[in-house]
Amino acid sequence: MALSLHVPHLHVPHVGSAQDQAHQEKTKPSRFGGIILTIAMLVALAAWVTSVIALISLGPVEFGVQRASVVGWTALGIVSAISLFMMGVWKVHRA
């Protein structure tokens, strides 16, 4: 049994957008697109978890010292968290 949640949102008309046309016709997004989005979300989640584990295992950082590994893992964690959030909003909007 699939749980469907419809979040109320403001409809802003876009001229000629295929997504808006599909929304007006009350058609569902493609199943293949949903599968790809879910896979991308799982990859972003795995990247975020990996970066958090790596940062914890590196231990505390001294003030004023920037190691490339800490900077890289922090950047990966931030980018993957933002991506995961954006894809989550997109997935809810697709429903």
Image: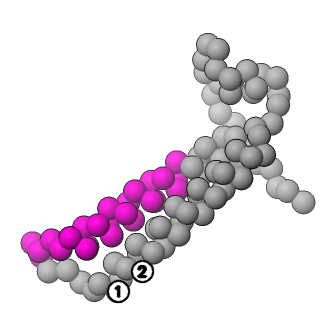
Residue identifier under label 1: 57
Q: Is residue 12 left or right of residue 26?
A: left
| Above-or-below relation of 7 to 66 | above
Q: Amino acid at mark 1?
A: Ser
Against 87, residue 30 (above or below) is: above
**Residue drawn at (14%, 80%), measured in percent from left and top?**
62
Using a 10 Å C-alpha cutoff, classify the residue at mark 2 as few (fewer than 14 neighbours), some (14 to 19) or many (20 or more). few
Please report contact status of discs 2 and 1: CB closer than 8 Å, yes or no. yes
| Residue for point 82% across, 23% down | 25
Please indicate whether residue 30 sits to the left or right of residue 90 in the image.
right
Q: Position of residue 92 (x, y in %)?
A: 67, 46
Residue located farthest toward the right when viewing the structure as drawn: 1
Residue range corresponding to the magenta coloring: 63-86
Identify which amino acid the numbered label 2 is placed on: Ile
Residue 53 disc label: 2
56 lies left or right of 26: left
Q: Quadrant of residue 10?
A: top right
Task: Point out the image quarter for the C terminus.
Answer: top right
Q: Write the residue at 35% across / 83% down.
A: 56
At label 1, counting other C-alpha atoms closer than 10 Å, the crowd grade (few under 14, some 14-19, many 20 or more) is few
Is residue 92 visible to the viewer in this orientation of the structure?
no
Image quadrant assignment for residue 75: bottom left
Locate the N terminus and report the quarter of the image it occupies.
Answer: bottom right
Q: Secondary structure at mark 2?
A: helix
Q: Is residue 93 visible?
A: yes
